[in-house]
């Protein structure tokens, strides 16, 4: 039971078109750019195309549940679907920022030397930071700090995302809280 | 303000080494980082299990219908009479 196997299952859902577009988000996406930190689950940002939407706005993820069940993954916890021992949380696109992040996700090679090649999509560093800023919990702000500390984000590209999605005020507040000089 | 009269050690080398370690870990491949995360999760699992057990115990204690009886039972158990 490894995270790589969990991602392999997600990539299969993508290949089978159960999810039309997806990208690894949250802490595991951050992992691609900064040092590993502990997380409880794997967040997958998904496009809402092809899912039934109720009038209330509720999106039914039945096709994902069915495809996972067909592959033998039937357990569900408060953290998400249990896939190869890791809880997976499917997060439907919920804002223009999410939409752009999904659109501009990058393709990653998840395989180690000697393993079967495995490609998966992952949010760009700049979108991981912008989404974290928007969510704004303390752990998200700490993640942004780690990106800056480790020089893992392109500041010019980040600024254009923040401006486009009206997040400059939130950015200034973050800099103040983190005791950082605003780089913009 | 407290005036320092001691000669405190200089920790800057330790912090520099930690920063170097962070930078080296950040430079690993995604696959290597995934493996590191699996390893990290395995290592902290006993700590998380113990934390959850403590939480369950606290909740059970709070939810007990008769806390007084619960305490009495505990005392009986502790005294070895049962």
Image: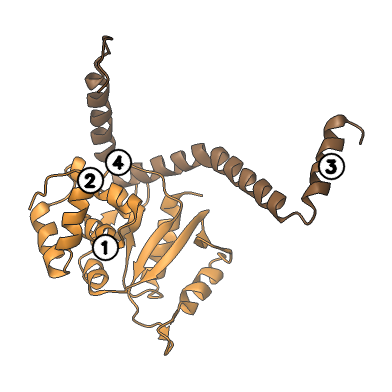
Chain colours: A orange, B brown
Q: Nearer the viewer, mark 4 or mark 3?
A: 3
Quarter assignment of residue B54 = top right
Task: Please report, as a chain letter, where disc 2 is located.
Answer: A
Task: Look at 11% across and 52% down and name the residue there.
Answer: A155
Mark closer to the observer (1, 3): 3
Q: Where residue A35 is drawn, which disc sits there?
A: 4
Q: Dot 1 falls on which chain? A: A
Single out the mark in the foreground, 4 or 1: 1
Q: CA distance from mark 4 to mark 3?
A: 51 Å
Give the Cα distance between marks 2 and 1. Answer: 15 Å
Q: Could you tell me which residue is drawn at 19 percent across and 49 percent down?
A: A176
Name the residue that disc number 1 marks: A134
Q: Upstream in the sequence, badge 4 or badge 2?
A: 4
Q: Earlier in the sequence, mark 2 or mark 1?
A: 1
**From what the image shows, is residue B81 above or below residue A70?**
above
For disc 2, the marked residue is: A178
The reply to whether the C-beta atoms of the residues labelled 2 and 3 are less than 8 Å apart is: no
In the rendered structure, find residue B72 and report the number of the disc placed on it.
3
């Amino acid at each position: 039971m490894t995270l790589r196997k969990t991602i392999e299952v997600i990539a299969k859902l993508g290949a089978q078109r159960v999810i039309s577009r997806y990208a690894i988000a949250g802490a595991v996406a951050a992992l691609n750019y900064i040092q590993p930190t502990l997380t409880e689950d794997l967040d997958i940002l998904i496009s809402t195309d092809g899912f039934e939407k109720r009038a209330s706005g509720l999106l039914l993820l039945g096709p994902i549940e069915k495809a996972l069940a067909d592959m033998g993954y039937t357990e569900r916890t408060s953290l998400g679907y249990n896939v190869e021992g890791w809880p997976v949380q499917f997060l439907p696109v919920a804002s223009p920022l999410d939409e752009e992040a999904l659109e501009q996700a990058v393709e990653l090679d998840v395989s180690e030397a000697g393993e079967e090649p495995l490609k998966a999509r992952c949010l760009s560093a700049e979108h991981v930071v912008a989404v974290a800023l928007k969510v704004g919990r303390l752990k998200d702000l700490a993640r942004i700090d780690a990106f800056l500390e480790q020089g893992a984000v392109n500041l010019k590209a980040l600024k254009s995302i923040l401006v486009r999605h009206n997040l400059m005020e939130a950015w200034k507040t973050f800099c103040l809280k983190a005791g950082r000089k605003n780089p913009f | 303000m407290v005036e320092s009269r001691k000669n405190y050690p200089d920790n800057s080398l330790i912090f520099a080494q930690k920063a170097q370690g962070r930078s080296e870990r950040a430079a690993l491949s995604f696959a290597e980082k995934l493996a590191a995360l699996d390893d990290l999760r395995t290592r902290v699992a006993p700590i998380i299990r113990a934390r959850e057990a403590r939480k369950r115990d606290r909740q059970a204690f709070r939810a007990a219908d008769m806390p007084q009886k619960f305490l009495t039972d505990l005392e009986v158990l502790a005294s070895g009479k049962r």
